[in-house]
Structure formats: structure tokens, C-alpha cells
Image: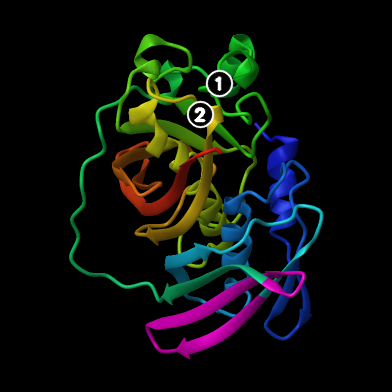
Amino acid sequence: MTSNRAERLLNALDLKQIEENLYLGENEPENGERIFGGQVLAQASMAAYRTITVLDAHSMHGYFLRPGDPSKRVLYEVERIRDGRSFSTRRVVAIQSGQAIFNMDISFQASEIGLEHSLPMPNVPLPSELQEDRKVAQRLGGAEADPRLSTMSKLERPFELRSVFELGTPAWAEARAWNPVWVRFMAPVTEAVGPSQPISRCLLAYASDMGLVSTGYLPHQHEVDRSQLQLASLDHSLWIHRPVPIDQWLLFHKRTSIAQGARALVHADFFSSDGQLIASATQEGLLRAKE
């Protein structure tokens, strides 16, 4: 199951410490004209984890300030805001050429037991009943053949994706507000599923930025071609509720609630294959017509 792309992402998470609270990150070579926001989310989370012991990340809130240059490494500066018995907080700024390209507050919590409730997983087909998105996109010819497809649709990714609405089908082409897709990291993660699992949670941060802005476009598929829009992540929040089995199938259930002012708001939940709600995300993205 291991893919080269997944291994390269793991290497990118192996940040180099250059001073106390300062870490340097290499970019994935597959970035296009700008660094994928999920990479910055994951590396910023890992930089914060480097200053934490025992506790695990449970929430992060970040702003994408400038496009990242894939030809330059990213410097992560961590500010130790607070260390408490139950919670600790870090602020991380990602820097290129002396300018902040991203900032994030991230909170960590000690493992605790308390009241529990959660929403049920939507009733959707299992990944074994679905086709791999990349293979379907290659068969369809990618964005060159259908501008509604992502330019990344034919490329190898760190995660395998299997969309509930199969690419190219009439159901996929309908104007709709939700976009469920099964995702699975394409390399084994050896850390235990339990307390202190920084790699899995950082990889989840990466995955939480996959396809959110484009979900905000789905209700308008019949109005404008995707290629005519400028899409970009503006701000991003992620809450992690349970230990993350990142190398097992997770249902990434994305849905958009509004588009207005050239911005779209998208919400998402991650469910394990046995129906447990693992994490939730919300993102506002730029949805602007190109001039």
C-alpha cells in the first residue's frame, strides 16, 4: 500500500531544528505554483508538537496570509503561549523571505474521560464498493478533458481517495452542496493509536485541506467552469475528537453552507470506518472569478 508520495510527505514532516522554537521544513516536490496549504498546516502542527510532551493536539485555527513559494523552504517559529496541567497553547508563524505566509494557534490537551455524544456517520457506500479517484480521472483524461476536474486529479497523492460520487458520472456532475470521499494515508504509520500520536494528527491536518475550497464550487458547476475561478484557502479550523487511525479508511464528509462576497464556507467531518466521529473542520475559501 505504501506510495512514494506518502513517504515524501513523511520526510517533509521531519523538520530540522535550527534554534530553540525555530524549525525548517522542506517542501513536497509535487507542489505546483504555490505550496499546498495542507503541507503548511501539517508542518506547523509538527513544529508545535516539537515543543510539547505527552499532550496531544485537539484544535487548531489558522490563516493563510500569502501564497507559499515551493522553491523556498519554510521557517516555522513557535511561541509558547501557555503550559498548563490539562491544556497547553502554541502560536506558530510560517515564514518565507522574511514574511509570514501563515499563522496558527494550536491547543493541546492531556487525555481525559468525560461525557460523550456524537453525530452518526452518513449512510454512504463503503470504500470497497467504490473506485479510486486517480484511476478514474486518468481514464477520463483529467482536467484537460473535463475542466470540472482538478488539475491534480491524475497525480499520485499521499492519500488514496475514493469519492462516493464517482468522477465523471451524472451524479457527480449535479449541482450539490456535499461531497463525501473516503481517504486513507498510503503508508503505514507505526506510532500507537492512542495518546501522543503527533504524526497521525499532523497528517490529518494535511488531509483536512484536501478539496474543501472546491466543495464550495460544487453548487455552481453548471454556472461556471472551475478553470475560470481563482480558488484558495483563506482560514482553516480543525478539531480532533479521538485518536486518529490515519492509515485506515476515513470518511471525509465535506459540505458547503454558503458562498457570498467571493468566499465560500465549507464544513467537514472525519469518520472512522466503524462510524466513530474522529475530527471536524471548517474552512473559508476564496471563490473569485478570474479577470
Q: Does the magenta portion include 83?
A: yes
Residue bearing mark 2 = 226
Label 1 sits on a secondary structure element that is: loop
Q: Does the magenta portion include 90?
A: yes
| Image quadrant in which you'd find residue 58 | bottom left
What's drawn in magenta, residue-wise?
77-99
Sequence-wise, the earlier of marks 2 and 1 is 1
Label 2 sits on a secondary structure element that is: helix
Q: Are marks 2 and 1 in contact (CB under 8 Å)?
A: yes
Image coordinates for residue 185, horizontal then vertical, percent: 57, 40
Q: Amino acid at mark 1?
A: Pro
Taking 234 as reference, is 282 left or right?
left
For disc 1, the neighbor class at 10 Å (few under 14, some 14 to 19, many from 20) is: some
| Image quadrant in which you'd find residue 60 | bottom left
Residue bearing mark 1 = 147
Q: What's the residue at 32%, 46% (across, down)?
A: 260
